[in-house]
Image: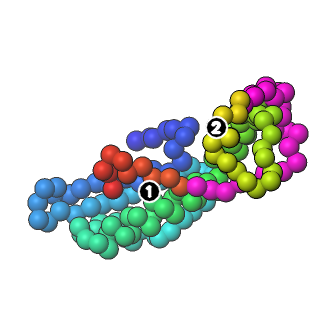
Amino acid sequence: QNIRSHFQHVFVIVCAQNPCTESVRYSMAVTRSKDVPPFGPAIPSPATFDKSDVFRDFLLAKVINAENAAHKSDKFHAMATRTRHEYLKDLAENSVTSTPIDSTGKFNLISLASKKREKTRARAGAEQQSTGALVWRVLAQDYSQGAE
């Protein structure tokens, strides 16, 4: 059977054999888009695992490496670049202010709160005029719902 997606580049399929029993085992298969480079760890033959910490660690390593490999694909890179560009453009056009910041180093929170802040509209394409930017990867996980 075929699985198609414009956004998912790697699929990891895990099937339980004899589920809800003491002898449960798991079979595993991985498929990836053509432009996603190969990644490890290699799946042994046969690809059947007992329920254990070894399988959990193997599966975790496989999906982390899958995500890292997907980020290296040309299609994913282009989509991520386009998204970052749009976020930067939105910030440059909608979050620019002309309110001066007191550079004396004496930040009084009370006086800052009482000053009226001006907001000006930046010109379209402002992000293209910036001389540089700092970019870093951030992985944020939300544990507020109790999920681990």
Residue 55 visible here: yes
User: Taking 45 as reference, is 82 left or right?
Assistant: right
- The answer to which of 120 and 58 lies nearer the viewer is 120
Question: Residue 23, percent across and down?
Answer: 14, 66
Quick one: quadrant of the N terminus?
top left
- Which quarter of the figure has residue 36? bottom right
Where is residue 40? Give x, y as percent: 50, 68
* Kind of residue at disc 2: Ala
Residue extent of the magenta highlight: 117-138
Q: How many marks?
A: 2
Residue toward you, 97 or 111: 111
Question: Going 33% across and 56% down the picture, which residue do you hit?
Answer: 148
Where residue 66 appears, as percent x and y from the top left, is 51, 59
Rendering coords of residue 140 (x, y %): 50, 53
Camera-side residue: 72 or 112? 112
Callout 1, which amino acid?
Val
Q: Which mark is residue 30?
A: 1
Numbered circle sitting on residue 113: 2
Assess whether residue 28 is covered by the magenta stretch.
no
- Which dot marks residue 22? none
> Going 57% across and 60% down the picture, which residue do you hit?
68
Q: How far apart are the alpha carbons under marks 2 and 1?
A: 55 Å
Residue under the point 81% across and 29% down: 122
